[in-house]
Image (cartoon, rainbow, N blue to C red):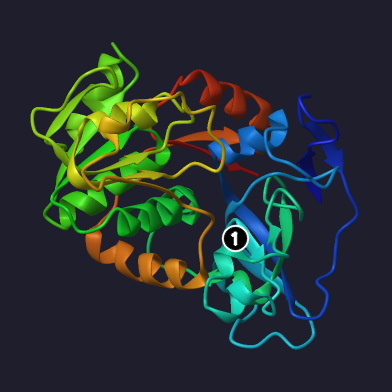
Amino acid sequence: MQAMVLKELGRPLVWTDLPDRSPGPGEIRVKVSACAVCRTDLHVVDGDLPNPVLPVIPGHEIVGRIDALGEGVEGLQLGERVGIPWLGHSCGACSYCAAGRENLCDHPLFTGFTRDGGFATAAIADARYAFPLGENGDDVSLAPLLCAGLIGWRSLVMAGEGHRVGLYGFGAAAHIVAQVAGWQGRSVFAFTRPGDVTTQGFARSLGVTWAGGSDEQPPQPLDAAIIYATSGELVPAALRALRKGGRVVCAGIHMSEIPGFPYDLLWGERQIMSVANLTRQDGLDFLGLAPRIGIVTHTNRYRLDQANQALSDLRAGRFEGAAVLVP
């Protein structure tokens, strides 16, 4: 197998030939057909996240077909198309797992961070954390659903049922969530970098009610705001756009320091909360609903050996939608 491997934090990934791997008990091996590139991959490569396991193969939005089954695997078959997400394993024994909150597990494994991921021609996964994808849709279009879609879905659920939803940072997750929220009958307000008229036009093409810069106020107070960008300065900006009783959801795994802000922005029973990872139930709920919604993911294809370029382009905001590596 071949892979793009992170051997040193802050350094480019290295194209590496590796021995073929066999799945252990309860595991599957997947021949990777597509792996989307997530902003979390940037945080892994840049060393923003603590305690990585190096060397590691990044990538956690994996689509492929099972070509080997480990002992004891049930409910999955050779040749079946599956998706492998960020949460790669939870302990099942801690208080969070016992309470049905495996996304907060004390002893988790994360695909592409603490276990090898999908920037490769093959990947090993815990069979219990792989989602059957069926045969509808092409592999490249489905790949961004495995994190941008799943975390987007969880963040939208956590935002509550308010009608006016603001999305700060209109990238891979927001362009999916905008379609979901629109399908639900909500009004979506898209916030981009100030002056980014290209991305604002992209947001309008997806049917948002309003699009503008993050330094602007929406034409109406928001019921909820979801922040996908990594800038902590957006937290007080989102609070400023919120009605009383509204909620700001921080959906990124990493964010820069949140600056101080006057209590008046929080007063009125406004809330700030974060999204941490996902549960398998999130995956079942969202992936079951996605075909009904008719989500169209906007993708930019890169060869597997172009992973460093894809990461660079993502960091610089050189494309709309999501980047996807294809072996």
Q: Position of residue 317 (x, y in %)?
A: 46, 21
> In the rendering, at what x and y percent does residue 292 appear?
24, 66
Query: Does residue 95 lie above or below 166 as drawn?
Result: below
From this view, report whether residue 305 is shown above or below residue 113. Answer: above
In the foreground, 81 or 177: 177
Q: Is residue 77 left or right of residue 153?
A: right
Residue lying furthest left: 219
Q: Position of residue 67 (x, y in %)?
A: 70, 70
Q: Quadrant of the C terminus?
A: top right
Vertical comparison of 296 with 157: above or below = above
As rendered, which of 316 and 242 lies closer to the eye? 242
The kind of residue on which mark 1 rests is Gly
User: Outermost residue, right direction?
Assistant: 19
The residue sitting at 70% across, 44% down in the picture is: 58
Left or right? Give the position of 220 relative to 216.
Answer: left
Residue 189 vs residue 116: left or right?
left
- Toward the top, the furthest residue is 195
Residue at the location (40% across, 43% down)?
173
Across and down, in percent, residue 190 comes to 24, 32
Residue 253 located left or right of residue 157:
right
Q: Residue at x 65, y 88 (%)?
A: 74
> 191 and 300: which one is in front?
191
Q: Can residue 169 be seen here?
A: no
Residue linked to disc 1: 64
- Residue at 52% x, 54% y: name it: 276
Q: Is residue 76 visible?
A: yes
| Few, some or many residues within 10 Å of mark 1 (<14, 14–19, 20+) | many
Number of numbered callouts drawn? 1
> Secondary structure beneath disc 1?
strand
